[in-house]
């Protein structure tokens, strides 16, 4: 019998575990609360929705390949130079572009133990070797990260705040991490949840990028701005990194609706502030309520909580997930992160939050 000859992916590609997004459907319940993807319960700004609709009559035209309007809006909002900003199809694209440009076969990429699952996917996809570094108390360990750096290291990812743990490193620790890195290693600060953090010792990375040649900061419009469906990400970086990305990225990697809606969203500061206030109100309420019924909740500064369940028959995380689904509540299993007895629960609407607390209270009886 003749064997079939066909194209074969290069070494390492088929070793990648595919990224599995949060569920969108539940098995029961008369209402559906989707709390699996860290989406904002307030939706998108009405101004962003209006800008999106205005594009309906112009779909025959290519978008601005430089996403000028969006970059300039981001620059105004953060006091940056628009020429140091690159926009992408979600921050995922930015992360993949950076890795493809700076990592190759024989190189290594370092990331923290419970960092975003896209990091090892991007590193492996570029032909490199992902190096996972243990955390302390579900928080990135600066000393361990630095100890993992070798002459082969080309990139280091730090999600700050981190998903799914909700933990963060104070800015002094981020600066200490950067100070210990060789100058050829690119430090990628993934600040997808920065808008939710209200801590005096936190900084998203803008200052460090401005002062360095080997640091970039990635951000997203998928969380507090409520535009996950449009896939809008951006990066602020040194001129030489921006130049490399602009040479390599697709010429029209941002669609016109995303450019228009993103610019309108970031300019509607009042709406984003309401989303942040809602989270600031409900994050401690949910944390305290779940802790009060005997669950362990990792302290979070994001718009979600990582909840750990008892190691008892019928009360473990998979049991809780099944029960919540029966009530129309969808949360995120953490098996892919090596946390099979934990669930990540997004801070939702007031009704959703109250229903989660009530359901888990019933589950633990």
Image: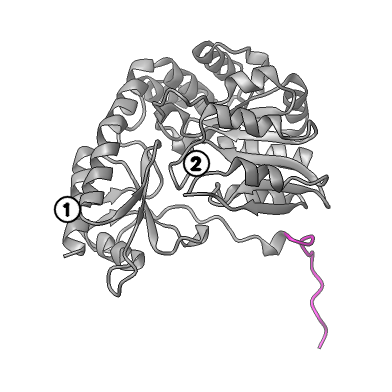
Q: Is residue 280 one of those drawn in magenta?
A: no
Residue extent of the magenta highlight: 1-12
Q: Is residue 278 left or right of residue 138?
A: left
In percent of the image, x 52 and y 15: which residue is there?
A: 78
Q: Is residue 327 left or right of residue 146?
A: left
In space, the residues marked 2 and 1 are separated at their CA atoms by: 27 Å
Number of the label disc, if any, that sits on residue 358: 1
The answer to which of marks 2 and 1 sits earlier in the sequence is 2
The answer to which quarter of the image holds residue 142 is top right
- Say what secondary structure mark 1 lies in: helix
Number of the label disc, if any, that sits on residue 48: none
Q: How many numbered discs, if any?
A: 2
Q: Is residue 169 left or right of residue 364?
A: right
Pointer 2 residue = 162
In percent of the image, x 68 and y 17: which residue is there?
A: 211
- Say what secondary structure mark 2 lies in: loop
In percent of the image, x 48 and y 37: which residue is there?
A: 168
93 above or below 122? above
Image coordinates of residue 66 in percent, x first then y, are 66, 21
131 above or below 273? below
Q: Quadrant of the N terminus?
A: bottom right
Pointers 2 and 1 in contact (C-beta within 8 Å): no
- Magenta residues, dominant SS class: loop
Mark 2 or 1, which is nearer the eye?
A: 2
In percent of the image, x 41 and y 46: which residue is there?
A: 37
């Amino acid at each position: 019998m003749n064997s079939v000859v066909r194209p074969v992916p290069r070494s390492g590609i088929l070793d990648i575990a595919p990224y599995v997004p949060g569920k969108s459907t539940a098995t029961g319940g008369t209402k559906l609360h989707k709390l699996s993807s860290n989406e904002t319960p307030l939706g998108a700004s009405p101004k962003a929705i209006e800008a999106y609709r205005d594009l309906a009559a112009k779909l025959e035209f290519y978008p601005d390949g430089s996403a000028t309007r969006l970059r300039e809006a981001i620059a105004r909002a953060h006091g940056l130079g628009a020429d140091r900003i690159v926009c992408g199809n979600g921050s995922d694209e930015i992360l993949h572009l950076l890795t493809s440009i700076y990592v190759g076969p024989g190189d290594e990429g370092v990331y923290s133990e419970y960092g975003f699952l896209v990091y090892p996917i991007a590193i492996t996809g570029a032909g490199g070797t992902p190096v996972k570094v243990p955390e302390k108390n579900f928080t990135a360990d600066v000393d361990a990260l630095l100890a993992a750096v070798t002459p082969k290291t080309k990139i280091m990812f730090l999600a700050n705040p981190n998903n799914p743990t909700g933990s963060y490193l104070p800015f002094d620790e981020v600066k200490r991490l950067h100070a210990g890195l060789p100058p050829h290693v690119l430090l990628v600060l993934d600040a997808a949840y920065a808008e939710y953090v209200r801590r005096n010792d936190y900084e998203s990375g803008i200052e460090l990028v401005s002062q360095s040649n080997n640091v970039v900061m990635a951000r997203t419009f998928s969380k507090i701005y409520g535009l996950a469906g449009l896939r809008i990400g951006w990066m602020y970086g040194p001129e030489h990194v921006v130049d490399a990305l602009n040479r390599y990225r697709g010429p029209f990697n941002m669609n016109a609706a995303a450019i228009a809606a993103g610019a309108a969203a970031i300019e509607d500061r009042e709406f984003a502030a309401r989303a942040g206030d809602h989270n600031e109100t409900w994050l401690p309420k949910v944390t305290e309520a779940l802790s009060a019924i005997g669950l362990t909740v990792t302290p979070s500064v994001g718009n979600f909580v990582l909840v750990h369940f008892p190691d008892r028959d019928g009360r473990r995380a998979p049991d809780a997930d099944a029960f919540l689904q029966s009530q129309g509540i969808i949360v995120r299993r953490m098996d892919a992160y090596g946390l099979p007895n934990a669930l990540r629960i997004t801070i939702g609407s007031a009704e959703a939050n109250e229903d989660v607390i009530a359901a888990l209270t019933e589950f633990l009886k």
